[in-house]
Image (spheres, rainbow, N blue to C red):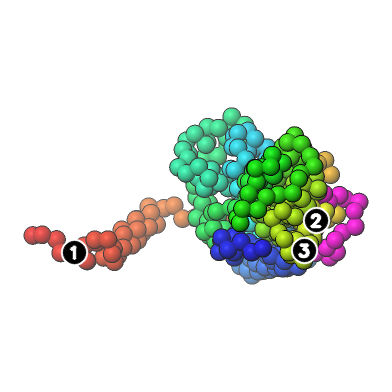
Amino acid sequence: MEDETYLGSTQYRYFTFTPSKLSQIRQRTNQLATQHLNESIQSAIQAGDLSDSGQDLLEREPLTAEEELKLVSYYITQSVAICDHFRTGSAVKATTLIFLQRIYLRISPLQIHPKTLLLPILYLAFKSENGVTSASWFIRTAAEAGLTITREELLTPEIDLAMNLRWAFQVLHPYRGIEGVKLELLAMQAGTYRGPAGETAPPFEGTRDRIERACGRARILLTGPALCTDVYFLYTPSQIAMAGIWVQDGGLIEYFLGVKIKDEAVRQRLLKVIRECGERHLLATKDAPNPYPGLLLRLPQNGVPISVEIPPELKKEAVRIDKKLFHLKKPLKEAKGKHPPATDTSEEERRAKKRKLEKENRDKDDVFGGGGMIKRKQ
């Protein structure tokens, strides 16, 4: 049952969790960001940059981890609309949304607002999936949708994004596995399937259209609403792919696993995981009992609808949370504004000398042929 390739991937090592661990990470990220914000406010108060209202700010209700989850989920749906404008295709869109989810495991909206990162994350996903991508083209295309961004604003966050992704740019998408399952099911249906030992499949009671219809709908699900859930963090790509087909036609997956896995205990254990993924996440509804009570997961029961559209209730909640976030950070921004960066000539000269000295030191230590490594000919 174990996929050695997947177990060696960064997706498994860095971004696969149990439900309780995923919830703990989100809580911890929120706690650290809240603590850092309060420390910054305390420093501003001590420096006299905040009035007495600074103490009031410390006593305000902080942004909760639940609110952070809803806010990020709202901007995930916003990102879908941007991807549609760029006509990204399934791969870039899916990678964009997963990058956004991964990044906000390690940072909080209290630190960087998701709105400011939507375009830089999309640009990084373009490069990750398609290779070199023109920044000028990207900025022009964004402008056509009324999204203004400069070259500096697009490229400056890139290193920080990469660091928070732990330099793991590969995303193993489950929708790609659906095509392989479909081809094998079609071979079984046509009677041409041969297993590793040359074994044939038992007769398949169904039509070619049944297979293609179920797999087609599963692909739509996994390249759409499923990207707004936590399944990428909780299950393997193959489990998600089969769960996507299972929610469309459970009989197909049960037949498929019956052919592929002869050990009854192993097959039933895998079916249990597939059903869990389908029922608890892909088919989750607001009125269903919460399968993870008390855990901070992206579920309709926690106020996070599974939809690539922007539900009115989520938009209303996001507006409320955005206002709360703005008022929490506004006094601190005003305090920083009291100390504008120095721009006089002497300061500029000092910075220029510092840059020159740093460059000279780098050249001395350059292992690829700096002046300190290779003697110049006289």
> Is 323 placed left or right of 359 in the picture?
right
Q: Separation of disc 3 and disc 2 at Cα? A: 16 Å
Q: Which mark is residue 275?
A: 2
**Residue 189 percent across, percent down from the top left:** 72, 41
Q: Residue at x 59, y 60 (%)?
A: 6
Earlier-in-chain disc, 3 versus 1: 3
Check disc 1 and give the amino acid type: Ile
Q: Which residues are magenta?
A: 282-300
204 or 95, which is in the foreground? 204
* Numbered disc 2: secondary structure: helix
125 or 360, which is in the foreground? 125
Q: Which residue is mark 1?
A: 374
Earlier-in-chain disc, 3 versus 2: 3
Check disc 3 and give the amino acid type: Glu
* Numbered disc 3: secondary structure: helix
**Residue 122 percent across, percent down from the top left:** 58, 44
Query: Would you say residue 284 is visible in this rendering?
Result: yes
148 or 295, which is in the foreground? 295
* Numbered disc 1: secondary structure: loop
Q: Which residue is mark 3?
A: 264
Around disc 1, counting alpha carbons within 10 Å, would you say few (fewer than 14), some (14 to 19), or many (20 or more)?
Answer: few
**23 shown above or below 117:** below
Q: From the image, which quarter does the C terminus lie in?
A: bottom left
Magenta span: helix, strand or loop, mainly?
loop
